[in-house]
Image (tube, rainbow, N blue to C red):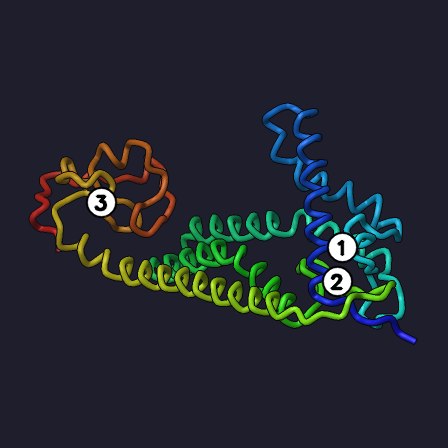
C-alpha cells in the first residue's frame, strides 16, 4: 500500500528547516575562506548538506523533523541516484547557470553584425526581461506547491521527486497556506507583467530612437554637436573624438569596428544630415 502524499505544510516546514541549516553551514564556511570567495559558500554548503543526506538515501534534518521521505513519481520507490544528484546540482547552481546562459546569449546577439538593429534591440530586451523574470519563476512554483502540494524546489519537480509521510500527520485544514500561495502567485504575475511592460516600453523607445538621431545635429555617443564628423562601416555618423576614442562598437546598431575602418568626412557640415 502506498504511503500518503505529504501535505504542503509538512513540505514547507522541512524546507524551512533545511534552509536554516544550510545557511548556518554557509556562514561557517564563509569564515574559513578568503573574503573574495565568500559568495561561493552558499552553493557549496547546499551541495555538502545534501550530499551527506539526500545523496546517501538518508532524510535531511528537515525531512526527519516533518516525518516525510523523498520518493520518485511512482510514490513507491526512493528516487534514483541520478535523480537525486541532478536535483542537488540544479538546486545549487540552476539559477546562476540560467543567468550565465542568458548573459552569454545577450553578448552573442550584441556582437552579431548580421542582425538588423531592430531585431538586435528586440532580442536584447527579451533576454534582459527573461533575466529579470528568473526569480519570479521560482516564486510561481513555490506558490503552486502551497496550493496544490508537491516539493518547494523546482529542481525536485524537474527530476520527478516528491514526498510521502512516513508517520501519521496531524489532520488540519491549511487554508492560510493556500491563501499565502494565492498572494504569492498574484505578486509573481504582477512582477512578470511589469517586466514585460518595461520591455515593450523599451522596444518602443528604441524603435523611435533612430528617427530622432537622423534629424539631429548631435553625436549620439557624446550627445554634443558633431565636430569633425566620421562615418563607420555601418553608415552611422559620429564625432572624430568618439570614433577614435573608447568606442569598439557602433552605439546605434552595435556593429563592431576597428579604428582603421573609420572614414573622416572632409568639408562636411552636420546640417546636411538627413
Q: Secondary structure at mark 2?
A: loop
Disc 2: which residue: 159
**Above or below 52: residue 180:** below
Residue 152: image quadrant is: bottom right
| Depth check, front residue: 130 or 104 | 130
Mark 1 and mark 2 residues within 8 Å of each other at the beta carbon? yes
Residue to which mark 1 is pinned: 86
In the rendered view of the protein, which quadrant contains the N terminus?
A: bottom right
With 35 as the anchor, is 121 left or right in this view? left
Choose mark 3 or mark 2, whichever is in front: 2
Say if 158 sits above or below 91 in the image: below
Question: Is 111 situated left or right of 4 in this image?
Answer: left
Task: Identify residue for label 3.
Answer: 220
Please identify the quarter of the rendering in which residue 7 is found: bottom right
Q: Residues within 10 Å of mark 3 (few under 14, many from 20)?
A: many
Helix, strand or loop status at disc 3: loop
Amino acid at each position: 500500500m502506498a504511503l500518503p502524499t505529504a501535505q504542503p505544510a509538512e513540505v514547507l516546514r522541512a524546507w524551512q528547516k533545511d534552509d536554516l541549516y544550510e545557511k548556518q553551514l554557509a556562514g561557517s564556511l564563509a569564515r574559513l575562506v578568503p573574503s573574495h570567495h565568500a559568495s561561493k559558500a552558499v552553493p557549496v554548503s547546499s551541495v555538502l548538506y545534501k550530499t551527506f543526506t539526500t545523496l546517501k538515501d538518508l532524510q535531511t534534518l528537515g525531512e526527519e523533523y516533518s516525518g516525510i521521505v523523498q520518493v520518485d513519481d511512482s510514490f513507491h520507490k526512493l528516487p534514483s541516484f541520478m535523480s537525486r544528484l541532478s536535483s542537488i546540482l540544479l538546486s545549487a547552481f540552476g539559477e546562476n547557470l540560467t543567468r550565465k546562459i542568458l548573459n552569454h546569449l545577450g553578448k552573442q546577439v550584441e556582437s552579431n553584425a548580421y542582425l538588423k538593429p531592430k531585431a538586435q534591440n528586440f532580442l536584447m530586451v527579451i533576454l534582459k526581461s527573461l533575466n529579470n523574470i528568473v526569480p519570479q519563476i521560482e516564486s510561481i512554483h513555490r506558490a503552486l506547491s502551497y496550493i496544490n502540494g508537491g516539493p518547494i524546489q523546482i529542481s525536485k519537480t524537474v527530476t520527478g521527486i516528491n514526498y510521502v509521510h512516513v508517520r501519521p500527520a496531524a489532520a488540519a485544514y491549511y487554508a492560510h497556506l493556500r491563501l499565502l500561495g494565492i498572494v504569492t502567485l498574484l505578486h509573481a504575475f504582477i512582477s512578470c507583467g511589469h517586466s514585460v511592460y518595461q520591455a515593450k516600453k523599451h522596444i518602443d523607445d528604441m524603435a523611435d530612437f533612430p528617427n530622432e538621431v537622423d534629424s539631429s545635429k548631435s553625436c549620439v555617443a557624446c550627445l554634443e554637436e558633431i565636430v569633425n564628423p566620421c562615418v563607420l562601416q555601418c553608415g552611422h555618423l559620429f564625432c572624430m573624438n568618439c570614433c577614435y576614442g573608447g568606442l569598439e562598437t557602433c552605439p546605434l546598431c552595435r556593429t563592431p569596428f576597428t579604428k582603421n575602418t573609420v572614414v573622416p568626412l572632409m568639408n562636411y557640415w552636420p546640417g546636411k544630415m538627413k
